Image: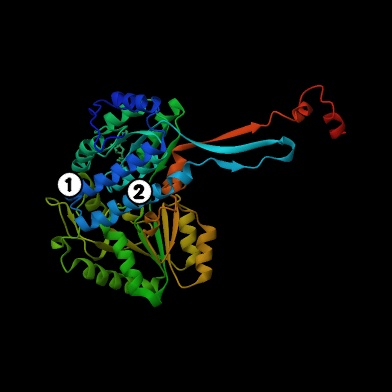
């Protein structure tokens, strides 16, 4: 019988946390379907019972409105939970495989087995979703887990450190920054899922090499938009503005900049301004639905990025409250905002003569986490689909790819390696072990043993 609320004393040091998770896994506690189901249920209960507490934490860390928290954090975790609870038995089932005729009579199957201890290192921008969505997959696959939330979202980190061990068995939380993460990375775990910057991603990969630990990297980068759909200007602008400014622009798959033919730049800028006004009013600083920049260092970085920029609208900011207005600029590819991922509410519009130049620009840079194309032309859609590479590709629809559990979420090249969500998470955190069984009767295997009687005749 698995209790409703698990009473475990939280492991305090990184080494303790990994050791405690390892012990629980080695004891065989996490493997049964009953345990996995109970854990998934407990996580759903945590979201139900502690929703208000978590919403307060997100408001404190990012001034994220409760509605936005539900939409962009908990709803995605709930969708993952629903999918995992519905599909768990099917995912756990051995997958039968046929064998070539010369191996007959034999049967073969892939048996999913848990990896062991999973380390999840999370960032601050969607601190709940990006911790709990991978956790769903790790639990569903029957693993023990160590979670390291981001120190830059301290209220969410504290809430997770308190709540996860209270509701869940075999899940340990280590709070802290680089020092604690470095200590965690020195421990041997069985898989690491890291979400954050490429700079730290490299550190994680190097540390993992010591133990030959497989790593999934969920990184970022500049996600471009191509826009040439003059007929749907307002609708496209509403979608782009929402995706670019949700969470005050601190979204890894947000449209980072928009490329458009020169004659569409001004109409698009005006439509974006209308869209921002419709969402957040004339003064977004008083909107209850507009977030804040996570900390002073990030705010300063964005202020510096705006220096010398050609601002079309927005541009106001306030250091004391870490407010940064939704801002659209006119830019060329040499502009400061076009060098690194913006990760804030600045959206440069870049004039490009046409699709060919836009594709050339994309392929000359790191492979993006997402690419969004707004066009009515089938040929243009095909050109982007076939001639560019990105973590995901959205036509007329930014951000939606993250909320579908049946679509693996992840990057490619510099934007990451490996994908998760739904079944992809289950498989990421499982080893699909080939199990081959040869029937005792009928020993045709004599063919493959010296002196190869029969085989020599066969090969001629
Ligand atoms: P970050 O790399 O600064 O921090 C992420 C995690 O790494 C934190 O838990 C932090 O404590 C840890 N960390 C920081 N420095 C470390 C060090 N020296 N050694 C070991 N661990 C260390 O990333 P961030 O600022 O939190 O996130 C921003 C980046 O993450 C952006 O590039 C964004 O695009 C990307 N991102 C990607 C996704 C995705 O799903 N692909 C989602 C959100 C954010």
> In the drawing, does residue 322 fall left or right of residue 200?
left
**Residue in front for this viewpoint, 269 or 422:** 422
Circle 1 Cα neighbour tier, 10 Å, few/some/many (<14 / 14–19 / ≥20) = some
- Give how far across and how far down residue 304 sits, in percent: 24, 51
Name above or below for residue 316 compared with residue 115: below
- Give how far across and how far down residue 405 sits, in percent: 40, 52
Name above or below for residue 107 compared with residue 343: above
Residue 411 appears in view: no
- Give how far across and how far down residue 75 sits, in percent: 30, 54
Residue 25 appears in view: yes
- Secondary structure beneath disc 2? helix
**Residue in front for this viewpoint, 180 or 268:** 180
Q: Write the residue at 33% across / 69% down.
A: 237
Name above or below for residue 83 compared with residue 42: below
Which residue is labeled 1 in the image? 53
Q: Nearer the viewer, mark 2 or mark 1?
A: 2
Circle 2 Cα neighbour tier, 10 Å, few/some/many (<14 / 14–19 / ≥20) = many
- In the rendered image, the residue lying farthest to the bottom is 231
Rendering quadrant holding ligand 1: top left
Which residue is labeled 2 in the image? 81
Q: Is mark 1 within 8 Å of ligand 1?
A: no
- In the rendered image, the residue lying farthest to the front is 1
Measure the alpha-carbon separation of dots 2 and 1: 20 Å
- Mark before the other along the chain sequence, 2 or 1: 1
Q: Write the residue at 26% across / 25% down.
A: 13
């Amino acid at each position: 019988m698995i209790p409703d609320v698990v009473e475990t004393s939280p492991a305090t040091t990184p080494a303790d946390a990994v050791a405690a998770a390892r012990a629980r896994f080695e004891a065989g506690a996490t493997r049964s379907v009953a345990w996995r189901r109970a854990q998934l249920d407990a996580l759903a209960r945590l979201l139900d019972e502690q929703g208000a507490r978590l919403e307060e934490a997100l408001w404190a860390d990012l001034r994220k409105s409760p509605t936005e928290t539900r939409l962009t954090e908990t709803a995605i975790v709930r969708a993952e939970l629903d999918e995992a609870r519905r599909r768990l038995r099917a995912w756990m089932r051995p997958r039968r495989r046929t064998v070539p005729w010369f191996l007959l009579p034999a049967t073969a199957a892939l048996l999913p087995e848990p990896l062991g201890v999973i380390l999840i290192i999370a960032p601050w921008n969607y601190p709940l979703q990006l911790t709990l969505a991978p956790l769903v997959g790790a639990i569903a696959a029957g693993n023990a887990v160590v979670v390291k939330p981001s120190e830059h979202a301290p209220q969410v980190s504290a809430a997770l450190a308190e709540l996860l061990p209270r509701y869940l068995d075999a899940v340990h939380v280590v709070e802290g920054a680089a020092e604690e993460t470095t200590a965690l990375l020195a421990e041997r775990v069985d898989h690491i899922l890291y979400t954050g910057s490429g700079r730290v991603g490299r550190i994680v990969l190097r540390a993992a090499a010591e133990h030959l630990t497989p790593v999934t990297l969920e990184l970022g980068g500049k996600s471009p938009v191509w826009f040439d759909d003059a007929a749907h200007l307002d609708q496209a602008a509403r979608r782009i503005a929402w995706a670019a400014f949700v969470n005050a622009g601190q979204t890894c798959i947000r449209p980072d900049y928009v490329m458009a033919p020169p004659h569409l730049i001004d109409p698009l800028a005006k439509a974006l301004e209308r869209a921002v006004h419709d969402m957040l009013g004339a003064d977004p600083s008083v909107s209850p639905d507009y977030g804040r920049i996570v900390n002073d260092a990030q705010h300063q970085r964005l202020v510096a990025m705006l220096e010398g920029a050609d601002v079309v609208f927005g541009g106001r900011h306030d250091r004391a409250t870490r407010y940064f207005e939704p801002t659209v600029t006119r830019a060329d590819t040499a502009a400061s905002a076009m060098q690194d991922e913006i990760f804030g509410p600045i959206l440069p519009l870049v004039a490009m003569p046409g699709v060919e130049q836009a594709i050339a620009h994309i392929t000359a840079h790191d492979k993006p986490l997402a690419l969004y194309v707004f066009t009515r032309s089938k040929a243009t859609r095909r050109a982007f689909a076939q001639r560019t590479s990105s973590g995901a590709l959205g036509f007329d629809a930014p951000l939606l790819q993250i909320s579908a559990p049946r679509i693996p979420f992840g990057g490619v090249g510099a934007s990451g390696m490996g994908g998760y969500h739904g079944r992809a998470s289950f498989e990421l955190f499982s080893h699909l072990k080939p199990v081959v069984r040869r029937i005792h009767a009928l020993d045709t295997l004599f063919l493959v043993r010296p002196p190869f009687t029969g085989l020599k005749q066969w090969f001629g």
